[in-house]
Image: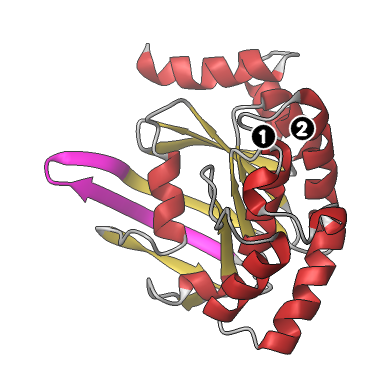
Amino acid sequence: MLEVKNIVKRFRDFTALDGISFKLNEGELVSLLGTNGSGKTVSIKIIVGFLKETAGSIKYNGKLMSQKQRSRVIGWAPQDDSFFGNLTLMENLVYFGNLNDVELKEAKKRAHELLKLLQLNHKKNALAKDLSGGMKRRLNMAIAMMHNPKILILDEPEAGVDPMSRVTLWEVVKEVKKKGTTILLVTHNLIETENLADRIIVMDAGKVVFEDTPEKLRKKFKEKNIENAFKKSVEKRTA
């Protein structure tokens, strides 16, 4: 479905990404893991078209994608709030739908569907700034999905939310996946990763050092605990 091929990103003399490659298959949830500074954020920004790669390519269904084309099939829910606090949830969704060329009638319909799916329908007329942390993360997701992207990137959606909101968030992620959306989940939550992900991608120092199932990672490093296996996958390169 989506193929990231030999992507390099340099900022003057600093190489942030050193030839990373991986694939996302239709309908799966893939977790992107790595320590701070491993290159996850730069990778995401290139995939969605916010940054241009120095070298390499990104293909969708076998066809090369330009930087401008990527946002048409990819939705990105960043860590930071991506909405206007003084607008209601419905107003935000319709506005961002229009920005993505969704006609008004369809935008309203899509907004109602997403608010229901993401368990926010009871807050549709509330101001976005008054939402809890967990609800704000879900609103970010809804905005990212307004143009009905085939691929959804979630950048640490659980960051800063309370335990109860986190449970609801993961329930919502599962429901979104059931609808057929391919999800790339960037997270530090390894326990949830093991429960949710079909595959995991581990990055370290701008390189992909592992790509397979959570079970395969544990087996590779002979660990019963996914956290210990992840630690070893990174330590092996820095030892």
Q: Circle 1 sits on which residue?
A: 158
Q: Position of residue 95 (x, y in %)?
A: 59, 73
Query: Which amino acid is tagged 1?
Result: Glu
The reply to whether residue 221 is in sight is no
Q: Position of residue 209 (x, y in %)?
A: 47, 33
Pointers 1 and 2 in contact (C-beta within 8 Å) = yes
Q: Position of residue 137 (x, y in %)?
A: 66, 45
- Determine the secondary structure under disc 1: loop
**Position above or below: 165 against 125:** above
Q: Circle 2 sits on which residue?
A: 166
Q: Residues within 10 Å of mark 2 (few under 14, many from 20)?
A: some
- Front residue of 96 and 9: 96
Q: Quadrant of the N terminus?
A: bottom right
Q: Residue at x 61, y 31 (%)?
A: 159
Q: Residue at x 64, y 23 (%)?
A: 220
Q: Quadrant of residue 87?
A: bottom right
Span shown in magenta = 2-17
Residue 9 falls within the magenta-colored stretch: yes
